Image (cartoon, rainbow, N blue to C red):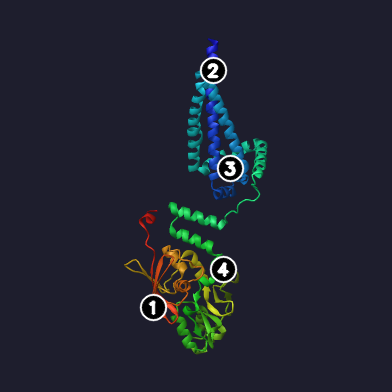
Amino acid sequence: MIAVIQANIELILTCLGIVILLVLSAFFSGSETALTASSRARMHHMAQEGDGRAAIVNRLLERKERLIGALLLGNNLVNIAASALATGLLIALFGEAGIAYATIVMTLLVLIFSEVLPKTYAINRPDRVALFVSRPVRLIVHGLAPMVMAVERLVVVLLRLFGVDLKQREALISASEELRGALELHEREGSLVKLERDMLDSILDLQQVQIGDIMVHRQNMQTINGALPPEQIVAEVIASTHTRLPVWQDDHDNIIGVLHARDLLRAVGNAGGDLAKVDIASLLTPPWFVPETNTLQSQLNAFRRKRMHFALVVDEYGALMGLVTLEDILEEIVGDISDEHDKPVSGVRPQPDGSYLVDGSVTLRDLNRQFDWGLPDDEAATIAGLVIHEARVIPEVGQAFVFHDFTFEVLRRHRHRIALLRVRPPVKSADSTAA
């Protein structure tokens, strides 16, 4: 009778030990998944806010090899121990057949309850689980550190025998590329709308895009002849939609200053409304010339540093190319900024047949942003410039070209400049549309 009771107690204790080991295995598996899948950015922010558990997670992830090694070591220890107990128990109950039974039963138990179930839960709630297990995992990592370090050194030696040097790691992607990938992924998953992604993408582009790509070209600049009488200059300023206007003398490229409408209005008031008494030359501010190769980021910083909103753009030879304003750079980030005085620009007109009538001066960046076309803007800034670059000639009216799966037909030309194009984007297949 006592022997039977002892046997039953041993059976119960063995089963209890197997359950405990399976629970520990689930803990190790879920912890590994949660900690590696947790958001580093969110953990960093929570740690800055004073969350001690998030700080522990950050410290654990700083030594990811040691963290993974400790969790794998612990997981293998409890899995092997659970399998050994189950094998001994089933051999005692069923003889040699118990080995097969133990293999089948433990495989199912470990797979379902110690691998799939905890990892599925952890991958769906990585941050919550990572915070929950942070403190016990820290103790485990510290406790198993000597064994893990020994294993790491052994692994390094073995890999060297096969010609693998762990010191020569593959180059990591830049933070900018990582952010772009995250933005694309979030937009695809529906958690980020296109407008928000475009804005964030544009911020990342500030260090790559040059002001020559977004400037107002000299052909589209509104300037004032400084030799005109004050009455006519006042009339042109009033008729303009801009508050700052470049003033030239003798030649359109000879900019002698910038006239601000507010300064002109104040001078007119001081003169008692007598426009003949207004000294235009005294109102001009010195022009600020910047190279077209400046990036948007550097120019934005220069605007802030000089506390100015307006600059004239020149090429490497000092020739006037156009102008750039603070608003132009901001529009690259947030999109078009219009007020009650702005005139709507109808540079792109969709057609019923799916094509678009596009003015030659429309920039490729605007088209790509608005229609997700993906036209290359490395060699040309405008749609007309792209056609000329790809065709290697100045096309005649009526000529059509196919570049990058787009069809470009020249509809109007002004001297050597393409004024109007018909653009047919590639037809998206049903499969790509569904994707």
Number of labels in the image equals 4
Q: Tell me the residue that label 2 is attached to.
A: 9
Q: Which mark is residue 295?
A: 4
Circle 1 residue = 397
**How many residues crowd mark 2 within 10 Å: few (<14), some (14–19), many (20+)?**
few
Asked if the residue at tag 3 contacts the one at tag 1, i.e. Cβ–Cβ closer than 8 Å, the answer is: no
Instruction: Give the structural element (helix, strand or loop) at label 4.
Output: loop
Mark 1: amino acid: Val
Mark with earlier residue (1, 4): 4
Viewer can see residue 274? no
Residue drawn at (47%, 79%), measured in percent from left and top? 219
Q: Amino acid at mark 4?
A: Thr
Residue 268 is situated, as x and y percent measured from the top left of the image, at 50, 84
Q: Earlier in the sequence, mark 1 or mark 2?
A: 2
- 154 sits left or right of 428 in the view: right
The reply to whether discs 2 and 4 touch (Cβ–Cβ < 8 Å) is: no
Q: CA distance from mark 2 to mark 4?
A: 77 Å
Mark found first going from the N terminus, 2 or 4:
2
Per the image, the residue denoted by label 3 is 53
Badge 3 crowding class, 10 Å Cα cut-off, few under 14, some 14 to 19, many 20 or more, is some
* Badge nearest the viewer, 1 or 4: 1
**Nearer to me, 126 or 50:** 126
| Disc 3 from disc 4: Cα separation | 41 Å
Report, in whole angstroms, how far the alpha carbon at label 1 lies from the one at label 3: 68 Å
Disc assigned to residue 184: none
Q: Residue at x 54, y 37 (%)?
A: 29
Q: CA distance from mark 3 to mark 2?
A: 40 Å
Earlier in the chain: of badge 3 and badge 2, it is 2
| x 50%, y 88%: residue | 230
